[in-house]
């Protein structure tokens, strides 16, 4: 009887671990146009004295894939003068005032959780003021994270669980700036079905079960 119970426990643990690695357990990627701002405007980027560094290039105005208001554009800062490192690729978005935004597809679906991840930069010679939101049905959900070191980048995130009142509503990524200059890169949006929560429960159950089996067998560590 004990042997049969052990076999059943082992089978359950193996099943749970297999479920953990099924593709459906992971988040669906929601496409974001020009997510790392590497697609340049028709006029390209320019290098002028206003850039503040001979090795940097920038644009002012429309960013492909994004709607903009105020003063913003795309920026290739090079290294050291403005940033110690780059987030993803040589180009990111900058905002001095106003916002840039993008409405993605699909719309809000009940039973899904949406997570926005984005890298925010802290330019050396300007105050850090980058802010990122998800905007859904007139409500804004602000991404939070650890303020990046001067000249560095930090990943911010916000998670929104679909509400019945929001089903069918558009999902908009909105980036803005509160002071100095906002710098943004590597925009990612994920959609996770409720079934993924069950997958997570299976993973936890498998870990607990294996630990119990190891203890029963006299294995430590």
Image (cartoon, rainbow, N blue to C red):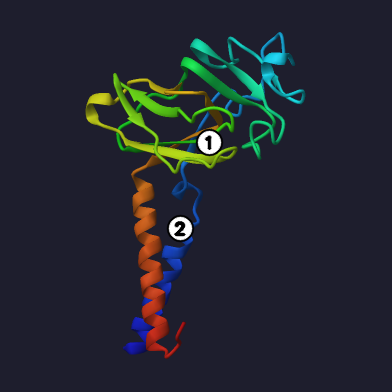
Q: Is residue 221 left or right of residue 49?
A: left
* Nearer to us: label 1 or label 2: 1
Q: Residue furthest bottom?
A: 218
Q: Residue furthest right?
A: 54
In percent of width and height, residue 130 lies at: 47, 28
Camera-side residue: 113 or 22?
Answer: 113
Of the numbered discs 1 and 2, the one sitting upstream in the chain is 2
Residue at mark 1 to residue at mark 2: CA–CA distance: 28 Å
Image quadrant where one finds the N terminus: bottom left
**Total residue callouts:** 2
**Quadrant in which residue 52 is drawn:** top right
SS for tag 2? Answer: helix
Q: Residue at x 53, y 42 (%)?
A: 149
Q: Is residue 45 visible?
A: no
Q: Which residue is mark 2?
A: 20
Q: Residue at x 47, y 15 (%)?
A: 97
Q: Which residue is mark 1?
A: 119
Camera-side residue: 190 or 18?
Answer: 190
Residue density around tag 1, few if under 14, some if 14–19, many if 20 or more, within 10 Å: many
**Quadrant in which residue 204 is drawn:** bottom left
Camera-side residue: 221 or 92?
Answer: 92
Q: Residue at x 42, y 72 (%)?
A: 11
Q: Is residue 73 left or right of residue 47?
A: left
Q: Is residue 50 left or right of residue 96?
A: right
In percent of width and height, residue 111 lies at: 31, 37
SS for tag 1? Answer: strand
**Quadrant in which residue 37 is drawn:** top right
In percent of width and height, residue 96 lies at: 51, 17
């Amino acid at each position: 009887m004990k042997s049969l119970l052990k076999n059943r426990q082992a089978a359950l643990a193996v099943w749970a671990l297999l479920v953990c690695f099924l593709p459906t357990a992971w988040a669906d990627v929601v496409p974001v146009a020009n997510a790392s701002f590497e697609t340049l405007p028709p006029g390209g980027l320019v290098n002028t004295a206003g850039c503040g560094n001979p090795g940097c290039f920038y644009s002012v105005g429309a960013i492909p894939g994004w709607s903009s208001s105020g003063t913003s554009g795309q920026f290739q800062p090079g290294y050291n003068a403005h940033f110690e490192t780059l987030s993803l690729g040589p180009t990111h978005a900058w905002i001095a005032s106003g916002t840039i935004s993008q409405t993605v597809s699909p719309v809000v679906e009940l039973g899904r959780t949406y997570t926005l991840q984005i890298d925010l930069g802290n330019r050396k010679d300007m105050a850090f003021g980058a802010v990122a939101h998800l905007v859904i049905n007139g409500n804004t959900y602000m991404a939070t994270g650890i303020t990046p070191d001067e000249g560095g980048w930090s990943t911010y995130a916000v998670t929104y669980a679909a509400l019945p009142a929001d089903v069918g509503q558009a999902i908009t990524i909105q980036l803005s700036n509160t002071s100095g200059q906002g710098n943004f890169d590597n925009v990612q949006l994920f959609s996770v079905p409720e079934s993924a929560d069950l997958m997570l429960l299976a993973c936890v159950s498998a870990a607990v079960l294996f630990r119990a089996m190891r203890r029963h067998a006299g294995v430590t560590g």
